[in-house]
Image (cartoon, grey):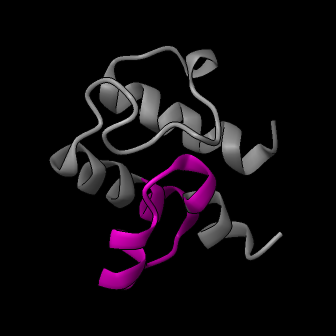
């Protein structure tokens, strides 16, 4: 697991009350228990704070999985 994915897993786990090891790049909105649209906003705000970045509304809407969020932080693979 990349450092970025590991850090995002920690954020998601804290917000959703899950264990980080139960999450992977495919975890996301409507796929992972408790990850709904409201929790998605909370996750993305914490990711912005953790990585000292800001996302556009389009990026917020498009980043529906942890893998997609990693892509926003690290850039295309």
Point out the image quarter for the N terminus: top right
Residue at 51% from the left image edge and 14% from the top image edge: 19
Q: In which quarter of the image is residue 26?
A: top right
Residue 31, given in percent of the width and then of the height, sits at 39, 34
Q: Is residue 43 left or right of residue 11?
A: left
Picture layout, residue 53 above or below residue 25: below
Magenta segment: does it hold 69? no
Q: Is residue 36 left or right of residue 60?
A: left
Q: Main secondary structure of the magenta part?
A: helix
Residue 40, given in percent of the width and then of the height, sits at 29, 50
Residue 69, given in percent of the width and then of the height, sits at 55, 60
Picture layout, residue 32 above or below residue 19: below
Instruction: Say how many tags the image has.
Output: 0
Residue 42, given in percent of the width and then of the height, sits at 26, 50
Q: Quadrant of residue 8?
A: top right
Residue at 63% from the left image edge and 32% from the top image edge: 24
Residue at 30% from the left image edge and 82% from the top image edge: 57
Picture layout, residue 29 above or below residue 52: above
Residue numbers of the magenta segment: 47-68
Residue at 32% from the left image edge and 23% from the top image edge: 33
Taking the view exactly as shown, the residue that stands out farthest to the front is 31
Picture layout, residue 75 above or below residue 35: below
Point out the image quarter for the C terminus: bottom right
Taking the view exactly as shown, the residue that stands out farthest to the left is 38
Q: Which of 12 and 30 is in front in this view?
A: 30
């Amino acid at each position: 697991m990349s450092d970025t994915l590991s850090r995002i897993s920690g954020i998601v786990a804290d917000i959703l009350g899950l264990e980080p090891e139960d999450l992977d790049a495919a975890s996301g909105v409507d796929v992972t228990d408790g990850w709904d649209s409201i929790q998605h906003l909370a996750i993305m705000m914490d990711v912005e704070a953790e990585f000292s970045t800001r996302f556009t509304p389009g990026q917020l809407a498009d980043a529906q999985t942890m893998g997609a969020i990693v892509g926003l932080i690290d850039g295309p693979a």
